[in-house]
Image: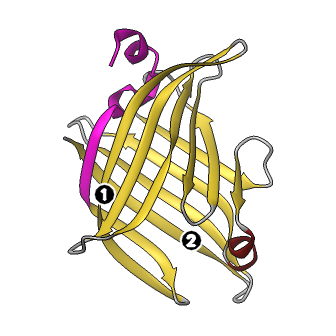
Amino acid sequence: MSAEIAKNLGPLAALAGIWEGDQGLDVSIIQSKKTETAYRERIVFEPLGPVRNGPQELYGLRYATTAWRLGEEDAFHEELGYWLWDAVQKQVLRCFMVPRGVLINAGGDAEADSTSFHLSAEVGSQTYGILSNKFLDASHKTMKYALDVHMHADGRFSYKEDTQLWIPADESVFHHTDQNTLTKQ
């Protein structure tokens, strides 16, 4: 990674590289039943920047995540996207898509030296929002997304995600959660 990019990644700088963890726990709905799945995960963060939007200048990480149920070879989850740092606005952004037809643009406040931050998105927001395909919008509509990230002093990082799904058949909101602790490889 170039020194120019490294000095402009703010709180994302420590994430650059390849991370793996096998302490994951996914709580989701499978065939209308709450299910807990232990998983391992690999995340690749590649530095990029600057990205210029007129006077706005962003630096960030291109990323790819793959997750496997423990003991299985076929992945059960993948996503692609970007983690971005806007130093002037002091905003961390995470823009990503999953191959189920869901797009999320989440954001939150942070300082350049933050070791923890919170990102969120809501359906209908014009800035930090959520889009789903027609099927999911009607059956398991993603209403809110929240992510907490923590960089540990020992070099690991952990996250907790809460994706709130409106399920019309049950007239309820289900909290699909994921969490893991990863180590740099």
> What x and y, as percent, mark residue 155?
23, 36
In the image, 96 versus 37, the foreground residue is: 96
* Residue labelled with disc 2: 175
Q: Nearer the viewer, mark 2 or mark 1?
A: 1
* Colouring scheme applied when the structure was drawn: secondary structure
- Tell me the quadrant of the picture where the N terminus can be found: top left
Three-letter code for the amino acid on which mark 2 is drawn: His
- Residue at screen point 38% across, 42% down: 150
> What x and y, as percent, mark residue 46?
38, 32
Q: CA distance from mark 2 to mark 1?
A: 21 Å
Q: Secondary structure at mark 1?
A: strand
- Tell me the quadrant of the picture where the C terminus can be found: top left
Q: Is residue 34 above or below residue 176?
A: below
* Residue labelled with disc 1: 41
> What x and y, as percent, mark residue 83?
50, 36
What's drawn in magenta, residue-wise? 1-22
Tell me where residue 56 sits by quadrant. Answer: top right
- Residue at screen point 43% across, 59% down: 78
> What x and y, as percent, mark residue 8?
46, 16
Three-letter code for the amino acid on which mark 1 is drawn: Glu
- Circles 2, 1 touching at the beta carbon (< 8 Å): no
Give the mark nearer the N terminus: 2 vs 1.
1
Q: Residues within 10 Å of mark 2 (few under 14, many from 20)?
A: some
- Residue at screen point 56% across, 48% down: 96
Q: Residues within 10 Å of mark 1 (few under 14, many from 20)?
A: many
In the image, taking residue 127 as reference, residue 22 lies left or right, namely left
Q: Is residue 24 magenta?
A: no
In the image, taking residue 63 as reference, residue 103 lies left or right, namely right
Q: Is residue 17 magenta?
A: yes
